[in-house]
Amino acid sequence: MAAPDLTAELDRLRAAGLYRRRRVQDGPQRPHGRTDGRSLVNFCSNDYLGLANHPEVIAALQQGAARWGVGSGSAHLVNGHSAAHQALEEDLAEFTGRPRALLFSTGYMANLGVIAALSGRGDTVFEDRLNHASLLDGALLARARLRRYPHADAAALERLAQRAAPRLIATDGVFSMDGDLAPLPALAQVARQADAWLLVDDAHGLGVLGREGRGSLDHCGLDAAAVPILMGTLGKAFGTFGAFVAGSEALIETLIQHARPYIYTTATPPALAAATRVSLALARREEWRRERLGTLIGRLRAGAAQLGLSLADSPTPIQPLLAGSAERALAWSAALESAGLLVTAIRPPTVPVGTARLRITLSAAHTDTDLERLLEALAGLPGVRDGPGASLSLSLS
């Protein structure tokens, strides 16, 4: 039998406007840099607080490497778990208000590990239709029955849960492509009534929302009793790399024993854990970063409304501008790049067919001038206005 023709599938993706390519960035993660040899202002990074290139975080990584070396050497359960890892887990547990936290190499692996460790054949897992792929794949890895409820519709979830009792309910806290928040209080009530686990992936809420950046749960006033499983990532607002799960003593010990993506993976470098402790402390104490983000979000949305641009309803640094087709999203992205702005086109299968978009993301490190340039360029995109054109005499003060 002949091998599958991979070239034909690649050609199909190109023809459909769905082919993806990597860009080469020459320099640290920050709003102003060089990408593919061009100087561009970056509006598509998840470095929401501007910590990825912070001098104190860099110094902590360098000092950590001098003490711990570069690699961890093995998995956490062999001899890769260092005092630096342990200290970071303790910091994360205190930060989230939970007894324990457990480090994972990525958020994707954390979600796979949690869901597969807590559910299996014969169990039902309910998930929001717009959940991150890692949550959906976790249910598939567990070989559980995956049931998806309409986006952010707690009433629909309640009706479904009455017909098929769930073992676990999983949701994003902040949805990564839309920027909106899950109805967490209502979901917690459904989970409580169904006697099910509730898992919240707060990758895009931690650092940004809540007191000291404690995330979506704190923003909604929910504690560990309401949401027993919290997953967070460290490579977005905290500016480093990795992920963690926070919860009860029994939960964390269960994951150590049964979460395959934890057991069978080399631990992240101890130096990275040391750097993350510093970035976490910065994120907590420097409230001005969240205040700055809030100001930028308000100015972007006000400016977009003045120009007749229809941004999705999002209170977070994720501000999607829907294009509809993949071809239009690509054209808009290319036009912005010509204007010196980097905003990636997000296309299926990352988002549903017909909802391709520009995923504009803001950082506390962006300047007012950066935002003015973005709005002026957005106003010139073909077919971007819902209504009559508006004047560019913007007031961003």
Image: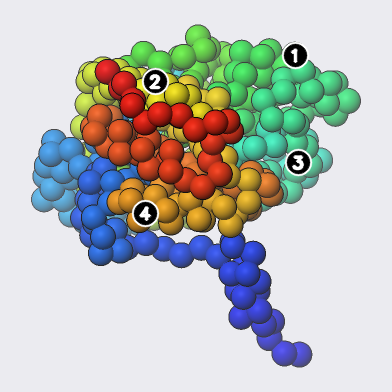
The first of marks 4 and 3 along the sequence is 3
**Which amino acid type is shown beneath numbered disc 2?**
Gly
Q: Is residue 308 above or below residue 322?
A: above
- Name the residue that disc number 2 marks: 298
Res. 193 mark: 1
For image coordinates 59% across by 61% down, the residue present is 18
What residue type is disc 4 on? Glu
Q: What mark, if any, has residue 337 been given in the picture?
A: 4
Q: Mark 2 packing: few (<14 Cα in 10 Å), some, or many (20+)? A: some
Of the image marks 2 and 4, the number of the one nearer the N terminus: 2
Disc 3 + disc 1, Cβ < 8 Å: no
Distance in Å between CA atoms under marks 4 and 3: 40 Å
Nearest-to-viewer mark from 1 and 2: 2
Q: Amino acid at mark 1?
A: Gln
Asked if 354 appears above or below 39 in the picture, the reply is above
- Give the vertical position of 144 relative to 368 (above or below): below
Closer to the camera in the image, 170 or 208: 208
Horizontal side of residue 148 vs 274, given as left or right = right
Question: Does the CB distance between marks 4 and 1 fall below 8 Å?
Answer: no
Q: Secondary structure at mark 4?
A: helix
Where is residue 108 drawn, in percent x and y? 51, 46
Q: Marks 3 and 2, Cα distance to the nearest angstrom?
A: 38 Å
Residue that badge 3 annotates: 146
Residue depicted at 40% across the width and 29% down the height: 391
